Amino acid sequence: MTLNPRLRQFLQAVASMFVLLAAWQIASFFFPYYLFPPVQDIVVRTVRILVNWPELKQVLETAMRIFIGLAGAFLLGSLLAIPIGRYPKLESYITPFLVFLQGIPALSWVIIAIIWFHGTEFRIAFIMIITTLPAFTFQVLDSYRSMSKDLFEMTMSFRPSAWTLFRVLIVPTILPGILTAWKINLGNAARVVVVAELVGATGGVGYELLRQQQLFDMAGALAWTIQLVLFVLVVQQVIVWVENWLLRYRPVSERAA
Amino acid sequence: MADPLIRFREVTKEFSRPDGVGTFTAVDRLSFAIEKGEIVAVLGKTGCGKSTMFNLLAGLIEPTSGKVDVAGHDPFSEFNAFRGKMGIVFQNDRLMPWRTALDNVVLGLEILDAKRAEAEIVARRWLARLGLSGNENDYPHALSGGMRQRVSIARAFAVEPDILLCDEPFSSLDEMTARDLRAEFVRLVKQAGKTAVFITHHINEAMDVGDRIMVFHRPARIAYEARMDAASREGSGRQAIQDEILKVLSLETGEGMPAAPVV
């Protein structure tokens, strides 16, 4: 019997997770509780966070910070990328600046933000935006540059206004790149938000992780980490669905799995 | 006699060389006139400047010197004066892959701010005229090359342009499909009383489509011109023009001239 490729992929993923969990469980028999707590304890803590509103609120707070950061970086990145795409001379001025930003570690931005700004939310938004801005800009710029010259000429032959050109040609052209950028930056943002919250916040998953470290509670640390992983997986799946719907014009073989 | 609809007066177009040193002339003091309702086939070897002339006519590039006049306007400096006045059929179909066949035909009308419902009615009618009823909701990847080119013809006609510009529109199709579309194209242009400039590098195609043929030598200048009437489309009249075109083309060095099989 031949399995559906998607079902087979899913079963393979389940199998590898099962092996990881089994190895962890075995380790919990031989190592102290604070190093390897049993799997069931981690699961219980994970579920408890999900059903306990004050704790779930912390997860949602982090999710909101990720969204705000990504949305801000996406908007700013697009505002930078489209003029650079239209006027290539701008690139020589803006790209070195973005490359420089890209080289600064997230932790350095946390320190800078703490020194520069007062409000916690503003600090975190700043860190999220500044760390994901270069990647968004470059990805949107790449998509813009991949715009077909043929389609541009064809559209121009109807003499569209700048807004109509943007709507009928530029947006659909850069859309696949935007969706990919969101998928990639989501993972980056989830890592950065934890660092930002760990050092500069009084709530959210990063702050809770700091508390678990102070309590030496491995089950709690893992349970909070899993919240973030689950959040990233769920949002990525939502993006894949949106992508498959928006890019439904593509042949089935070219769609995201 | 009325003024011609299209007039090139001593038009020259120079481009910078790719290495940035000096310029090369793609169109050299080109002059011609096209009357309303005429179909003019422009013939020439690859690289002779046909497409540059096409882009000048479409207003997509500016002449270095001389004047391009279309219905009393400059298509480059008065770009927006030609909204809905020109329809272009390109060498490849240039369909937007994210739009269905219907939406691709609607595109021009949408840009011209037509109401969606009205635009759809017009687009459906053109698709039906070109034998694509039932394919309205298909995306381009699901259509054959011939069907895609039909959609692009429908897109050009749907805006009811006064002038149709065609840049080797059937060159990527097999001969049978190209022949059918060619005949359909001429019928539609004549029926609607449009003016058309049809660029090709196939001698027989130029003779089948054009009321007049202009043969270009590099850099784009007219080396030979022939009017096609009923007598010159068939038999010895056709043969004589064909021989003359071949002779003119052979006088120019450069890439070979692919002649479509006589059908």
Image (cartoon, coloured by chain):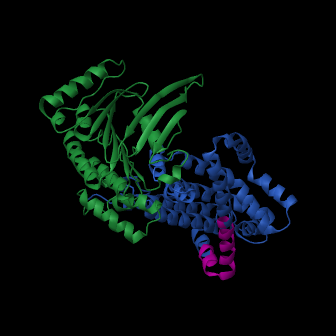
Left or right of A121? Residue B218 is: left
Work out whether residue A120 or residue B235 is closer to the camera in this orientation and state it: B235
Which chain identifier belongs to the blue chain?
A
| Residue A100 position (above or below residue B25) | below
Looking at the magenta stretch, what is its main secondary structure?
helix
Residue at image coords 53%, 29%: B14
Q: Is residue A64 above or below residue B67?
A: below
Q: Quadrant of residue A245?
A: bottom left
Is residue A13 placed above or below B164 in the rendered structure? below
Residue pictured at 39% horizontal, 71% vertical: B117
Residue positioned most to the left: B235
Is A132 magenta? The answer is: no
Estimate the x, y position of residue B131 in percent, counting from the top left.
23, 57
Q: Is residue B87 left or right of B192 when viewed as pictured?
A: right
Give percent across and percent down for residue B79.
52, 49
Chain B, chosen colour in render: green
Please give the name of the residue rendered at 64% of the width and 46% of the height, measured from the top-left corner: A84
Residue range of the region highlighted in magenta in the rendering: A45-67
Within the image, what quadrant is residue A127 found in? Answer: bottom right
Please name whichever residue, A65 or A247, is drawn nearer the observer in this view of the structure: A247
Q: Is residue A44 visible?
A: yes
Instruction: Farthest residue to the front: give it.
Output: B1
Taking depth in this image into account, of A70 and B116 the one nearest to the observer is B116
Query: Residue at point 24% right, 29% down?
Result: B259
- x and y, in percent, of residue A8 in the image: 37, 59
Q: Is residue B30 left or right of residue B252?
A: right
Percent position of residue A106, x then y: 74, 53
